[in-house]
Image (tube, helix red, strand yellow):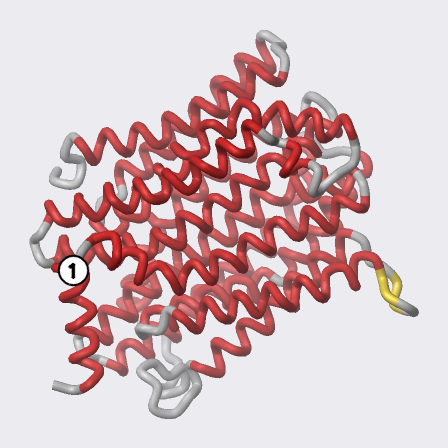
Amino acid sequence: MTAHTAAMTARTQQMLHAPLLPTLFRLATPNILGLFAMTLVIGYDGFILGRLGADALAGVALVLPLSMLMLQMSAGGIGGATTAAVARALGAGNADDASRLAQHALFIAVAAGALFSLAQWSGGRAVYAAMGGHGGALRDAMSYSNILFGGAVVIWSTNVLAGIVRGSGNMLLPSLALLGMAGVHVLLCPVLVFGWGPLPGLGVAGAAISMLAANAVASIVLASHLLRKGGAVHLLRLPWRLRTPLLAAILRVGIPASLSPVISNASIAAATAFVGSYGIAALAGYGVAARLEYILVPIAFGFGTALTAMVATNMGARQPQRALKVTWAGAAVVFAITGSIGLAAALLPALWMNLFTTDPAVRSFGAQYLNIVGGCYGLFGLGLALFFASQGAGRMFWPLAASMARLVAVAAGGWVCVQWLHLPATVFFFVVAFSFAAYALTLAAAIRLGGWTR
């Protein structure tokens, strides 16, 4: 038995037999480093752009659902499928297939990034206008979006390269690369947004350029690792030739995993559109407040990738009861963390809102949103954790059904409140809170009632 095989066997035995919570935290720790980086970047953009005024905040709020959709599809959907495919090949002792799968994953990343760029260039303005953007907010949305999505291939490549490295068994390097990416963005973003010395400020466009530059640095680091001689996965070990079965091996998992964030972000886009009918200050306040929700996603991702691995290993070993114990233990941890954040935001919304804007109207609207919706953030985190566990179980119907329940709640409830009855925004906020509960409780009930066994 080689040292690599022995280490792999030891990790598998720990997931099958070691105490649940210590094993979960040990696996999640490297991912938490990446979580810190993503959290920093999400919050930092709002902090910097808030200094440009309500139009800039509202414009970036319009782009945020689509940019987060791209991040979730590239990192959690195709990126997660890439991790699984590469790991399976290496576990079977087939390093050549692992390298071929890595090549095919990068092809998918380039193709998907190009599609995102094309979609934004052809229909971005219409989408942002339909979501309530107009005037200066729409102008800033287009300035930010044209650059960010123009470089979509860079962002897709970064996240898929990270998925390849994770599949090779290295959880630390992708997290360190994300930390480095955050560091570059923190230093570069204010310089490009506000200018420095003879360098003129570029406004919201500068934030998008900084984001692409930071991702490019991370991509170079990850690609260099995958070009090392003797590495488990080597991008140039074999000629680059497209093979349909290898593409299918990634897409068979990646496409269903990518549908859930599509539906979830449709819910966010619908909510943004309804809020936009209350005015620019309302849209800006909602954009700042809802940005906190995007921080909950990487928290769930940090623990969720560990949940996926542990649940998959135990289901593969025909230990479904332990898989369920892992699921509920991990979900409880994520519920506690996200619930605590939500409770703090609900009770003291100024702690969050005051970081991003001094506009009293924007602050007031965002505070009302957090007062009502923040109390359900724990349920949102619970649903996300159960989604990752369901990936490990290979049961994706109920996660998609739960996401659809959330979308229906927002779309139908929002139409009734805003378009039909013309109720105050606070009533619509209760609809958003209910949609989080519907998402989590639908999935939790399905798993509890045996949804993984049918």
Relative to 234, residue 180 above or below: above
Relative to 174, residue 394 above or below: above
Quadrant of residue 4 within the rendered picture: bottom left
Q: Position of residue 90 (x, y in %)?
A: 24, 76
In screen coordinates, is 270 left or right of 366? Answer: left
> Disc 1 residue type?
Ala
Q: For the point 75% across and 44% down, which residue is it? A: 50
Tag 1's secondary structure? loop
User: Do we see residue 84 in this rendering?
Assistant: yes
Other-residue count near label 1 (Cα within 10 Å), few / some / many at <14 / 14–19 / ≥20: few
Q: Position of residue 329 (x, y in %)?
A: 25, 44
Q: For the point 72% across and 44% down, which residue is it? A: 141
**Farthest residue in the bottom direction?**
229
* Quadrant including the N terminus: bottom left
* Quadrant including the C terminus: top left
Viewer-proximal residue, 118 or 368? Answer: 368
In the picture of the structure, the residue carrying the numbered disc 1 is 18
Q: For the point 16% across and 60% down, which residue is it? A: 18
Q: For the point 62% across and 56% down, which residue is it? A: 149
Q: Position of residue 132 (x, y in %)?
A: 68, 30
Q: Position of residue 224 (x, y in %)?
A: 49, 83
**Farthest residue in the left direction?**
318
**Farthest residue in the top direction?**
421
